Image (cartoon, rainbow, N blue to C red):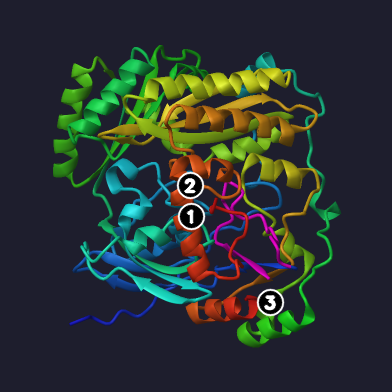
Amino acid sequence: MTAHFEPERPATRADDLPWARWGAPRPLPQAALDLLRSAFTLPEQGAPAVPAERVRPAESRLPETARSAFAAALGAEHVHTGDAARLARAGGQSTPDLLRRRAGDASAAPDAVLLPGDAGEVAAVLRVAG
Amino acid sequence: MAVVPYGGGTSVVGGLDALRGEHGSVVTLDLRRLDRMTDLDPVSMTATLEAGLRAPEAEELLRRHGMTLGHVPQSFEHASIGGFAATRSAGQASAGYGRFDAMVTALTVVTPAGTLRLGRAPASAAGPDLRQLFLDGEGALGVITDVTVRVRPVPEVLLDEAWSVPDFAAGTAALRGLAQAGALPTVARLSDELETAIMGSVAGPRPPPGCQLVTCYEGTAETVEARRAAAHRVLTAAGATPLGAGPVAGWREGRFSAPYLRDTLLDAGALAETLETAASWRRLPELYGAVRDALTAALGASGTPPIVMAHVSHAYPDGASLYYTVLAAQAADPVAQWAAAKRAAGDAIVGCGGTITHHHAVGADHRPWMRAETGELGAEVLRAVKRTVDPRGILNPGKLIP
């Protein structure tokens, strides 16, 4: 006999990753900074990242037929081809990933971001894509 | 069209780059709306979690019912359940709770050829374990949409203790003793001399000598006391000196802060990156030195001599992982600078009989060494599986499969 369990969703959502960072800036302890400056020659001005608002991904190459098929499968509100959604998924969190994004390189951005609601919609996306 | 499955966005091996492969376009399949706990079985002590749940969200759901997953990698704040499954994640408490792949009893995988529901019993002799084939598929063998995982009661007791050992060799011998006696604490993390000195000098004016071992015990009062007594016998016999709970507080407080501090280091013009491997106890000393030397030589050749420090974060009866942190000044082209260092480290790892990754997975960055892991026939087996479930090669091209 299986007891029925009513599915639950979390009350609090995890934060989204910001552009080209893990989170809001945190200062290094002074002792760590001193150690760093004694070990390495670092530029006075640091190596600031290109501001997020100056970074644009290349034009989306998603064909219109695919976009409407995805919209039919997921609902148009779950198919995103705007810059912000695409930039937010432009690669992971390795140091090379971050260095490229900090330099303003958005070449790892996808042509579209799809937000399926369940396993059936995931299967539908794969059917359209394949 | 290529499809890149996406969970928390925390891959550190190039697993999420939207590579088009041979396709005209590429879409990212963000699983965040798959965010439910769909079952909790308090009799079997398992929960079914959808892939898009982030780790803190899954913990919130489980703790409502007095349960925990006990999976706490450094990426905890952002990483997803599906990502843990698709990369064979290991966490800071994996000695006590097991790696993520060891917690999964069942999973659903959606592939272009159809959907698999794998796992129906705690153990099975019905052929090779297909669950293990699709765990660590890294989105190239299908999209994991939910997993059923073993859960534990939220621990009643958390007990922290730091130890000092004279050097890294004595520390690894102590960890080996713990693992082989079945006496590993829930967390056991041994820093090498340089990591101990640097962390110590940041934490206070008098960095401790030798190497520091952080241990934590979680469980009931009874199990914690029993395990602690067993660990104490092994550690004392190995020449370790107890330092009390104090030094562990700093580790606990900063356990998720390294990625934030890396941002700050990059802002300052420093290069900061980590890499990891694992090997048998017999090969570990040679591997430890070879990887450090390869990183030092490669970054030295770029004109940016590095600081290379390491710790052991996961110990097993037959071997352990090594986790390196590398700091240097950024060269004019820091991406090329790190690529040369990473190549040297990867070659040293493979040359010393280590694995190219203990828990970060393969992605694009470790793919050049996959053939060394699997051999040509093993690589062909993986390609055959890929052809069967994804005949048109739409899933995460350029990742994992050699």
Amino acid type indicated by mark 3? Val
Q: Residues within 10 Å of mark 2 (few under 14, many from 20)?
A: few
Residue B324 coordinates in the image, percent (x, y): 51, 29
Residue B335 position within the rendered picture, expressed as x and y whole percent measured from the top left:
72, 36
Q: How packed is label 3: few (under 14 Cα within 10 Å), some, or many (20 or more)?
A: many
Say above or below: B181 vs B1. Answer: above
Question: In the rendered structure, are the residues bearing label 2 and label 1 in contact, judged by CB atoms less than 8 Å apart?
Answer: yes
Q: Amino acid at mark 1?
A: Glu
2 or 3: mark nearer the eye: 2
Mark in the foreground, 3 or 1: 1
Mark 3 falls on what kind of element?
Answer: strand
What residue is rendered at 70% in x and 18% in y?
A: B301
Residue B258's place in the image compared with B156, above or below, is: above
State yes or no: residue B179 in magenta.
no
Q: Is residue B72 visible?
A: yes
Of all residues, the one furthest to the bottom in this rendering is A72
Name the chain under label 2. B
Numbered disc 1: secondary structure: helix
Kindly identify the residue that appears in the image at 38 percent across and 77 percent down.
Answer: A7
Task: Please state the extent of the stretch shown in magenta in the rendering.
Answer: B1-23
Residue drawn at point x = 36 percent, y = 54 percent: B101
Please state the horizontal and vertical placement of residue A25, each as a whole percent of the image.
Answer: 67, 42
Comparing B150 with B349, the one in front is B349
User: Disc 3 designates what residue?
Assistant: A79
The answer for how far apart the CA atoms under marks 3 and 1 are is 36 Å
| Residue under label 1 | B380
The chain ID associated with circle 1 is B
State whether the magenta stretch is mostly helix, strand or loop: loop
Residue type of the residue flagged with mark 2: Glu
